[in-house]
Image (cartoon, coloured by chain):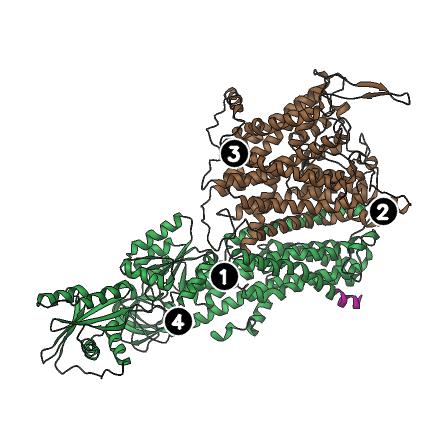
């Protein structure tokens, strides 16, 4: 077999081999069972005592959300202030200036919500201080927020008739001390020994063979890149993200980054099975997610390996496939694998230029983010999936002649209201965003703004539309990757995507938590022969159909005008 | 009444439904159905566009716009028609029941004097008199007297029933006829407030409330509708960006095709049809919710007598003691029972009659029949020639024998034990204090009942038998009939406690009852079915009334409830799955003129953009009337387990819902293409 393809398959299998035991471990951590990382307990106790937190105090779903939203607001203000003031703060060897208010607004939100849409370049737009104490810090806490929120839902599914769903701070701190910190440490060490810089010195210079003086940015990169992937964040040290030779020097680091970003999302699916003692149910979820992943993956790898028909028409042979925008050290198959994984998983780091990918691949990446729950981001992937489960349970419950119930709780009007709203939200913010930007480009191209709307797009037509659609989809899915042909570093894009990111992050956390909390409080109905079992392949097909129909139905016209039109025009 | 059951559409109902379809266009009425309401708005917009296109061709030709308008109007009308026809059917069913209790003269008692008034003038608390041959004018309770009553007009059962004052058999129903004797009856309902009146109001929509499940589904459908509002509204700037002008007709067509009009249009019809089906089964439901809950039942409480077994015990075997001839024994048994009017006694004579070897006997003249008393627990016959025959419970007859110095034969005692352990009742017979043998009485389980319980088990419903028998007998019958659990030596409060315990465990419980002492349990149960022959208190407490007084009706009610939910679920799936094909018809039609590469999406190879759009909206409209029969009849429930059922319905309505519109739209396009 083609070595490129074998490499991709090996990477995936390696991810699985690590994710299953990690899932078991995560379940043990949150069940409060013994683990070999119990030596972290004194540190946790210190944190709790220092902050005056009593982890024995259990919270209901509203208290959980209150805690989550409060601490996130604090971080938002903290990040915003630091980014604006970074020029005056220490650890700034390259003397980079503070960010403008709109860029700081966008960047602060972007990192807070685990999106990491970067409308700046790390080399000039950030300092070592902000990279460390804003970005890396938010990398950890945003991932931990997602995991903690998911654990609340786990608890709600596990216990019968209760509103005591554990302590948010307990879940949150343990997500960091027991999961994110130890694994990041191991990954960072691998990176550091493979050529990623870990220096606090400023730019280095050398004189190239042509005689030009070249300034090379550097910094303590390895540590940030580890959590950037592990926490499905994706906000890179450099502007070029993981396509940059210092941020991703070789195939080994590339594989490590790929495994790291898929690791926790997949592990959490298995953790659900171990935690609830419903392994079959977690296999069904994993199966649905994997089939979805393959559905996006296979056409993408295929399209990239076959090269660009437009170039082929010019008589150029492309033996390695479509190489535009790709790193020679990774090749098209691996880049395609990365592109799909990073979009379905909401990492949003890139090792190739997504804007240069084939239109078919672009369609798949967009759909990955539109669905946003095939594995999905740290914790939030399953939360998004949960909404689709609720809708699937509702429809299929009716189809078998029984008031729909999930894990013994009846799904009624209130839960449906929340689920419908959350399912509606994603298409709403994406389509409305893209509609506003299209409107501005058509009707006010010469608006007297810092950057004229007429200059936003380097590629007019369908591809330009795809770039705008991608930007909002990426923001709404908290992904953070971009079709970078778009001039997005200006106030219009900073503000609109900022708003989309906030809505796309917190509402899909609030919704599932509210549903889970409401359900946990309901009368528990024991299973009978008339109960629809949620751990069967039939139900899996139902969830899959609901996901695909909601995603495909809401986005089909937009996709048709963007990458689909482009795809057919290439033929 | 039976004859209308098979035809779905009847002439007079059709006319009424057609009229109602237009009346229901009133936005204030349609507002209750968000999906169809948005279609009506779209229709109105298209009317304006049609008028506008008369003068200005920028929105396409007048003919095209007007056709779209007509098709959309039809879509709304079809949906209204579905609801109206369901209402008309339900109403007709209820009316035909009401007819039986139309204006009849009543003999009202005023200050002890009789006055002739019409039944409609009777008020709650009035007292009237009925004698042989009188129709009972309205529902009431007998306060004096006893009578045989023909209830066939309501129940279809021809055998007359006995009703008497006091106790659980005191209730009479309007429209039934007194066959003998005279009764004084007190009116229990205000005119216009009987259960039937309430049911008619429920069907007519005046007091019809959406059930919780219907509300949840409406929310989901409203969600889908909103998604497509967003899709269509945002398409305008997208189209502008792509230099693709999209006509208003195309926008509205796309929108109407995408929103779940099929289920939106049929939703209320499905709900009404559920109540109607219950009514056809002769069950009056007091709310739509009760029917829906019936589909979810986990536990059914059933009385043994009358439900699981046929009325009373019957004699099944004669076991003589050693040395007694079978013939002689049987003859003695018959002698003892000839004057015995109890069902058990009759069945002994009956069983003996089947045995041709036994000569028929007559009681000698001047024989004295000894009645059964609770004290002696035996009955019998004393003949003039000095024979003292007794039959009765094992211990009482044994006492008689032992007192007289006779022994109790061991083989008879063995038989007694055997009969008891088989769930039967032994009747020991003695003659002149000597034991002759034992008669076996058995409960006869209704034929086919075990299969019905098996069917319930497959639906996930647990059956519980309630009986006054001792635990041993109860266990035997429970096993034989195939019920899952039983309550033996049941007192009324035992039912209540059982229901509460089940509900504590999160289960939904149904029970059937008729007596006043059943009322608390009927009220406690999630579905309480009161028999029409039951007391007023029982009928008030339950949420359904069974006109047939048939205790196995619960099984039918469960299936009706399940059908109701399934019909909603499958049509929702079908409706949403349809969208795939509609997209492939409309999206290429919208863009292929300005973006030729999107012609590749026209996989159905439709004639032209206009014909594609028209075909999609026409398909969307005609699918509603085509599915009305399914909505009214309900999707068939098969007890094959939830997963298998889901697989089956997903295949038929999900996959079918994806494929059928591809075929339908293509066919319509071939037809429409001829005119364009």
Disc 2 crowd rating (10 Å Cα; few below 14, some 14-19, many 20+) is: some
State the residue position of label 3. Answer: A28
The answer to whether residue B197 is visible is no
Residue A309 left/right relative to B545: right
Range shown magenta: B669-676
State the residue position of label 1. Answer: B639
Residue drawn 65% across the image and 34% down it: A502
* Foreground tag (4 vs 3): 3
Mark 3 and mark 1 in contact? Answer it, CB < 8 Å. no
Element type at marker 4?
Answer: helix
Q: Which chain is brown?
A: A
* Foreground tag (2 vs 4): 2
Does residue B99 sit above or below B537 in this rendering?
A: below
Q: Looking at the picture, do discs 2 and 4 lie on one chain? A: no
Q: CA distance from mark 2 to mark 1?
A: 55 Å
**Quadrant in the rendering for residue A509:** top right
Task: State which chain disc 4 sits on.
Answer: B
Element type at marker 3?
Answer: helix
Q: Position of residue B392 (x, y in %)?
A: 18, 68
Q: Position of residue B452 (x, y in %)?
A: 43, 65
Q: CA distance from mark 2 to mark 3?
A: 51 Å
Residue drawn 61% across the image and 41% down it: A384
Shown colour of chain B: green
- Can you tell which mark lies on residue A309? 2
């Amino acid at each position: 077999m083609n070595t490129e393809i074998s490499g991709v398959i090996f990477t995936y299998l390696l991810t699985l081999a690590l994710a299953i035991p990690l899932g078991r471990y995560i379940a043990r951590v949150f069940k409060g069972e013994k683990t070999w990382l119990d030596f972290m307990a004194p540190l946790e106790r210190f944190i709790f005592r220092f902050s005056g937190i009593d982890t024995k105090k259990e919270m209901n779903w509203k208290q959980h959300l209150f805690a989550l939203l409060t601490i996130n607001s604090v971080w938002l203000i903290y990040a915003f202030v630091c980014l604006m003031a970074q020029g005056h703060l220490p650890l700034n060897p390259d003397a980079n200036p503070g960010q403008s208010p709109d860029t700081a607004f966008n960047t602060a939100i972007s990192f807070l919500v685990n999106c990491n849409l970067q409308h700046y370049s790390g080399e000039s737009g950030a300092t070592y201080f902000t990279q460390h104490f804003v970005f890396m810090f938010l990398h950890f806490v945003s991932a931990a927020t997602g995991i903690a929120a998911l654990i609340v839902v786990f608890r709600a599914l596990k216990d019968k008739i209760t509103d005591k769903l554990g302590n948010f701070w307990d879940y949150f701190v343990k997500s960091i001390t027991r999961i994110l910190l130890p694994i990041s440490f191991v990954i960072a060490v691998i990176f550091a020994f493979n050529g990623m810089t870990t220096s606090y010195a400023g730019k280095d210079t050398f004189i190239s063979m042509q005689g030009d003086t070249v300034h090379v940015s550097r910094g303590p990169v390895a540590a940030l890149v580890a959590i950037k992937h592990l926490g499905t964040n994706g906000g890179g040290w450099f502007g070029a993200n993981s396509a940059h030779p210092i941020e991703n020097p070789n195939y080994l680091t590339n594989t490590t980054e790929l495994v790291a970003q898929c690791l926790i999302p997949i592990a959490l699916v298995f953790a659900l099975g171990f935690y609830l003692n419903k392994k079959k149910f977690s296999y069904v979820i994993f199966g649905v997610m994997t089939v979805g992943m393959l559905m996006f993956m296979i056409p993408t790898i295929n399209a990239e390996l076959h090269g660009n028909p437009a170039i082929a028409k010019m008589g150029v042979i492309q033996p390695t496939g479509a190489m535009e925008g790709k790193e020679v050290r990774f090749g098209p198959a691996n880049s395609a694998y990365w592109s799909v994984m990073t979009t379905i998983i909401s990492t949003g780091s890139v090792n190739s230029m997504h804007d240069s990918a084939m239109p078919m691949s672009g369609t798949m990446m967009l759909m990955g983010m539109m669905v946003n729950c095939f594995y999905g981001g740290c914790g939030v992937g399953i939360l998004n999936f949960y909404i689709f489960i609720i809708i699937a349970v509702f429809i299929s419950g009716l189809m078998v002649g029984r008031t729909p119930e999930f894990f013994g709780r009846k799904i009624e009007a209130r839960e449906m209201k929340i689920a419908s709203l959350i399912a509606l939200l994603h298409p709403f913010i994406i389509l409305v965003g893209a509609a506003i930007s299209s409107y501005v480009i058509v009707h006010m191209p010469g608006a007297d703004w810092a950057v004229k709307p007429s200059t936003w797009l380097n590629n007019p037509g369908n591809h330009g539309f795809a770039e705008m659609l991608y930007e909002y989809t990426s923001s709404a899915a908290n992904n953070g990757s971009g079709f970078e042909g778009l001039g997005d570093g200006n106030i219009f894009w900073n503000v609109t995507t900022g708003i989309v990111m906030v809505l796309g992050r917190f509402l899909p956390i609030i919704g599932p938590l509210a549903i889970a909390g409401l359900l946990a409080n309901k009368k528990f109905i024991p299973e009978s022969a008339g109960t629809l079992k949620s751990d069967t392949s039939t139900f899996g097909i139902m969830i899959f159909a609901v996901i695909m129909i909601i995603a495909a139905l809401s986005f089909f016209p937009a996709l048709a005008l963007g990458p689909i039109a482009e795809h057919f025009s290439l033929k | 009444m039976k004859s209308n059951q098979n035809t779905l559409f009847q002439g007079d109902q059709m006319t009424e439904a057609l009229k109602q379809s237009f009346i229901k266009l009133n936005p204030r009425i349609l507002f209750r159905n968000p999906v169809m309401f948005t279609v009506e708005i779209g229709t109105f917009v298209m009317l304006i566009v049609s008028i506008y296109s008369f003068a200005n061709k920028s929105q396409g030709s007048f003919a095209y716009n007007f056709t779209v308008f007509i098709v959309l109007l039809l879509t709304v009308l079809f949906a209204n028609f579905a609801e109206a026809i369901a209402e008309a059917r339900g109403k007709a069913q209820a009316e035909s029941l009401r007819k039986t209790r139309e204006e009849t003269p009543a003999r009202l008692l005023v200050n002890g004097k009789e006055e002739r008034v019409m039944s409609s003038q009777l008020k709650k608390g009035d007292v009237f008199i009925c004698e042989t041959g009188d129709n009972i004018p309205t529902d009431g309770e007998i306060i004096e007297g006893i009578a045989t009553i023909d209830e066939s007009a309501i129940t279809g059962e021809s055998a007359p029933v006995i009703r008497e004052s006091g106790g659980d058999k005191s209730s009479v129903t309007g429209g039934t006829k007194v066959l003998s004797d005279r009764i004084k009856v007190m009116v229990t309902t205000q005119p216009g407030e009987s259960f039937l009146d309430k049911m008619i109001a429920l069907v007519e929509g005046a007091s019809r409330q959406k059930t919780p499940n219907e509300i949840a589904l409406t929310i989901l459908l409203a969600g889908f509708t909103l998604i497509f509002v967003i899709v269509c509204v945002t398409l305008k700037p997208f189209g502008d960006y792509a230099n693709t002008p999209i006509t208003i007709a195309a926008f509205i067509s796309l929108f109407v095709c995408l929103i779940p009009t099929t289920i939106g249009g049929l939703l209320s019809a499905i709900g009404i049809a559920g109540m109607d089906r219950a009514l056809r089964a002769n069950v009056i439901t007091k709310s739509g919710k009760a029917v829906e809950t019936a589909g979810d039942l986990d536990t059914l409480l059933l009385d043994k007598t009358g439900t699981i077994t046929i009325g009373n015990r019957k004699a099944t075997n004669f076991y003589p003691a050693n040395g007694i001839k079978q013939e002689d024994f049987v003859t003695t048994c018959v002698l003892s029972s000839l004057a015995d009017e109890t069902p058990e006694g009759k069945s002994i004579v009956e069983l003996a009659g089947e045995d041709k070897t036994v000569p028929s006997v007559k009681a000698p003249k001047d024989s004295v029949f000894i009645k059964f008393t609770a004290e002696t627990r035996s009955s019998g016959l004393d003949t003039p020639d000095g024979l003292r025959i007794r039959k009765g419970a094992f211990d009482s007859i044994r006492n008689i024998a032992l007192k007289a110095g006779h022994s109790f034969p061991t083989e008879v005692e063995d038989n007694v034990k055997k009969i008891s352990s088989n769930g039967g009742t032994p009747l020991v017979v003695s003659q002149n204090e000597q034991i002759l043998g034992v008669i076996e009485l058995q409960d006869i389980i209704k034929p086919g009942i075990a299969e019905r319980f098996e069917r319930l088990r497959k639906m996930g419903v647990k059956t519980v038998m309630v009986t006054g028998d001792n635990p041993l007998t109860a266990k035997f019958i429970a096993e034989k009939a195939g019920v899952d659990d039983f309550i033996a030596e049941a007192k009324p409060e035992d039912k209540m406690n059982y229901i509460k315990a089940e509900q504590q465990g999160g289960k939904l419980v149904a029970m059937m009852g008729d007596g006043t002492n059943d009322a608390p349990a009927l009220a406690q149960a999630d579905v309480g079915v009161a028999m029409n022959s039951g007391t007023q208190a029982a009928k008030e407490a339950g949420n359904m009334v069974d006109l047939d007084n048939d205790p196995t009706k619960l099984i039918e009610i469960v299936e009706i409830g399940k059908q109701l939910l399934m019909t909603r679920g499958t049509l929702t799936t079908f409706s949403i799955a349809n969208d795939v094909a509609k997209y492939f018809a409309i999206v290429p039609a919208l863009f292929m003129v300005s973006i030729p590469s999107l012609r590749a999406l026209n996989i159905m190879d439709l004639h032209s953009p206009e014909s594609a759009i028209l075909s999609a909206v026409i398909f969307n409209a005609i699918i509603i009337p085509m599915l009305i029969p399914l909505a009214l009849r309900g999707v068939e429930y098969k007890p094959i387990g939830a997963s298998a059922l889901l697989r089956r319905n997903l295949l038929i309505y999900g996959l079918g819902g994806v494929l059928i519109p591809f075929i339908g739209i293509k066919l319509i396009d071939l037809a429409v293409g001829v005119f364009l």
